[in-house]
Image (tube, rainbow, N blue to C red):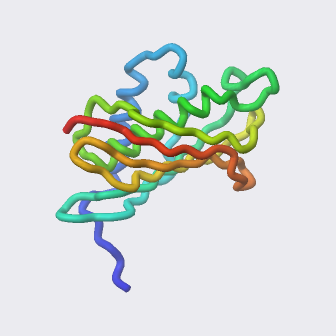
Amino acid sequence: MAATAFPVSDDELRRRAGQCHAELLAAKVTLTTPPVSRLQVETIEPTGAKDGRITGAKLVFSFTVDESDCNAWRTLHGGCVFTICNAAGKIAAAVVAAGARNLVSTDLTTHYLAGVPVGATVAVEIECLRTTRSIAFLRGSIRDAAGNLCYMCVQNVSFEL
């Protein structure tokens, strides 16, 4: 089976991710800036292409849990998990939907399976499954260093082109 040729370069995908990440940070939302600022893009992999554009992508971020991200049990706070999934999903949507702006999560469901302790580095994987002209459909997971599934999310992101 022949490999799919993707119409967008790796550099362009990273540029799109970086631009959306910068816009999220520039919003200066006090409660969300610290965890969002520590999301690091590790890999971006296109997963589909049609008519000269990418139609899906999988992004993997790394994130190290800080004391300020934790609850009283010194594990990653549920609100922080939600914030990380929200930001990573918007970045993934922006990577696939070139030129997307005014990205808004219209639905974000999170599942909390296991806690992650302070100091742990996790892998945040978000996959943009499909986009329409104004909505991206995503799913994601957060895994600990041993690869154990700790959190899952399903998200829809609305945007303008």
Q: Nearer the viewer, residue 21 or 151?
A: 151
Residue 144 pos. (x, y %): 71, 47
Q: Nearer the viewer, residue 11 or 76?
A: 76
- What residue occupies the far top of the structure in this picture? 30
Question: In the rendered image, which quarter is residue 45 located in?
Answer: bottom left
Q: How many marks?
A: 0
- What residue occupies the far right of the structure in this picture? 73
Residue pictured at 52% horizontal, 22% vertical:
32
Residue 82 lies, with reference to residue 94, above or below; the image says above
Say which quadrant the N terminus sits in.
bottom left
Residue 43 pos. (x, y %): 48, 53
Residue 38 pos. (x, y %): 56, 32
Residue pictured at 35% horizontal, 27% vertical:
23
Q: Nearer the viewer, residue 157 or 36?
A: 157
Question: In the rendered image, which quarter is residue 46 located in?
Answer: bottom left
Left/right of residue 128 with respect to residue 38 in the rendered view: left
Say which quadrant the C terminus sits in.
top left
Residue 131 pos. (x, y %): 30, 51
Tell me if residue 4 can be seen: yes
Residue 27 lies, with reference to residue 120, above or below; the image says above
Left/right of residue 12 with respect to residue 37 in the rendered view: left
Residue 80 lies, with reference to residue 6, above or below; the image says above
Left/right of residue 34 with respect to residue 19 in the rendered view: right
Residue pictured at 75% horizontal, 34% vertical:
119
Left/right of residue 87 with respect to residue 102 in the rendered view: right
Residue pictured at 74% horizontal, 23% vertical:
71
Tell me if residue 12 can be seen: no
